[in-house]
Amino acid sequence: MGSEKTLVIGLFGFGVVGEGLYKVLHQTPSLKASIKRVCIKNTNKKRNAPAELFTTDMYDLLNDPEINVIVEVINDSEVGYHIVSTALKNGKDVVSASKKMLSEHLPELIELQNTTGRSLLYEASACASIPVIRNLEEYYDNDLLHSIKAIVNGSTNFILTKMFEEHLSFKEALLLAQQLGFAETDPTLDIEGYDAVNKWVLLLTHSYGVNTTIDKLLFNGITQINELDAQVAQSKNQSIKLVAQAKKLNNGKVATFVLPQFIDQADHLFFVKNEYNGVVIETGFADKQFFYGKGAGSFPTASAVLSDIAALRYGYKYEYKKSNQHAPGELSDDFHMRVYLSFDDFSKIPKDEFVSVEEWHSGNERSYLVGTIPYKTLESSNWWKTNNTSLIMLPNGIVEDMELQELKKMSLSLAGMEL
Ligand code: HSE
């Protein structure tokens, strides 16, 4: 580790997070870090900072030898990648909050850290204020981590809370999430699950050493969740949340997905509401641990950026321990999933794909079933994302062999069941 150094920051982006960082840094004089220049795209917006701080020329920052840290908090992932990779090549350490950019370019960025010897930190990119990346990186031995289950997107959690507890419409709740600065500039990234799965790619790297991309992961957002789903959840004293989950299977491989999920009251995630995020980690010896904090918003996100900046003072780097010092984790497609499925057209549901069915309820407008389906079926098709269907994972919904046999024995027959 290097000795503490004075940090001269070049900041890219002055939106919700960038401006938040500017303010937070002013309240943290002990850090001995100052922002020298800020690069922005749009010069027409009024900025709450001296005009001479701003430039639109990225090379004013990237080529300034006095600037030794680049903080990148913009939302264009291609431009972000160019900035971050150039900064590393130019000998600067980097802090980024751009989950989409990081998830799309992580292998190249790890390689660049190795070749340049510089550090790229991105604690703010997943679960904002919760120090989950550094924790996963430093604390857990690969073999001890049984599972990790998390709410990683603040906007969708906020929307679901407002819809189910305050009876706002989806549209109203989304608008509020946008007004409060929680949602992405393009909010479909939040509501269709892209933001959550981008973050999950990063967390899988630091928890299990799994190097993957979003096109290899099963995920969905919350746009299909409807009134019937909410009623079913309520009747079972459960809530519905968008949950990212990974679990080590008996075969040593990792089962993972990002999907809406029913959450029991006994689950720590049940109490994670609004823009808060939560992470439940299960390990061999410690049993369950729960991390909780704000997952979106200006100051909570800036607080994680600030913590990364502070860590750069003593030369902190991610070592990617789970990939480098252990056998990298491998994803499995060999497991089953217990799911709830609601639909208005049973003919669109490939019922033969269900290996067992536990519940069946037909209604006038919508019906639903609860059953078990191979992961591979969902991975290789998208009928469950279209046709006005809604698929929600059950609690403890990852099914391995033994349990599968039990479920099969109890199965109802779907033959002849129609709306
Ligand atoms: N749109 C993101 C969220 C912002 O709602 O979680 C924080 O990453």
Image (cartoon, rainbow, N blue to C red):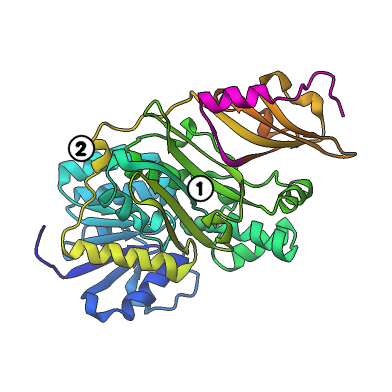
Q: Which residue is mark 2?
A: 325
For the residue carrying disc 1, how many other residues have a C-alpha within 10 Å: few (<14), some (14-19), or many (20+)?
A: many
Determine if residue 75 is in view: yes
Can residue 257 be found in the magenta stretch? no
Q: Is residue 244 left or right of residue 139?
A: right
Q: Is residue 354 visible?
A: no
Q: Give coordinates of residue 137: x percent, y percent.
A: 28, 49
Q: Residue at x 9, y 64 (%)?
A: 3
Q: Quadrant of the C terminus?
A: top right
Kind of residue sitting beneath label 1: Ala
Please name the amino acid that badge 2 sits on: Gln
- Of the numbered discs 1 and 2, the one sitting upstream in the chain is 1
Q: Is residue 417 above or below residue 8?
A: above
Position of residue 20 relative to residue 73, above or below, is below
In the picture provided, is 406 more to the left or to the right than 20? right
Residue labelled 1 has its Cβ within 8 Å of some atom of ligand 1: yes
**Rendered view: 112 above or below 290:** above
On screen, residue 371 versus residue 362, left or right, reads: left
Image coordinates of residue 33 in percent, x first then y, are 23, 72
Measured in 3D between alpha carbons, the distance from the residue under mark 1 to the one under mark 2, in whole angstroms, is 27 Å
Residue projecting furthest to the right: 364
Expressed as whole percent of the image width and height from the top left, the position of residue 309 reads 26, 64
**Which class describes the residues within 10 Å of circle 2: few (<14), some (14-19), or many (20+)?**
few
Which residues make up the magenta segment? 394-419
Viewer-proximal residue among 236 and 381: 236
SS at badge 2: loop
Judging by the rendered image, the residue that carries numbered circle 1 is: 196
Left or right for 199, reference 166: left
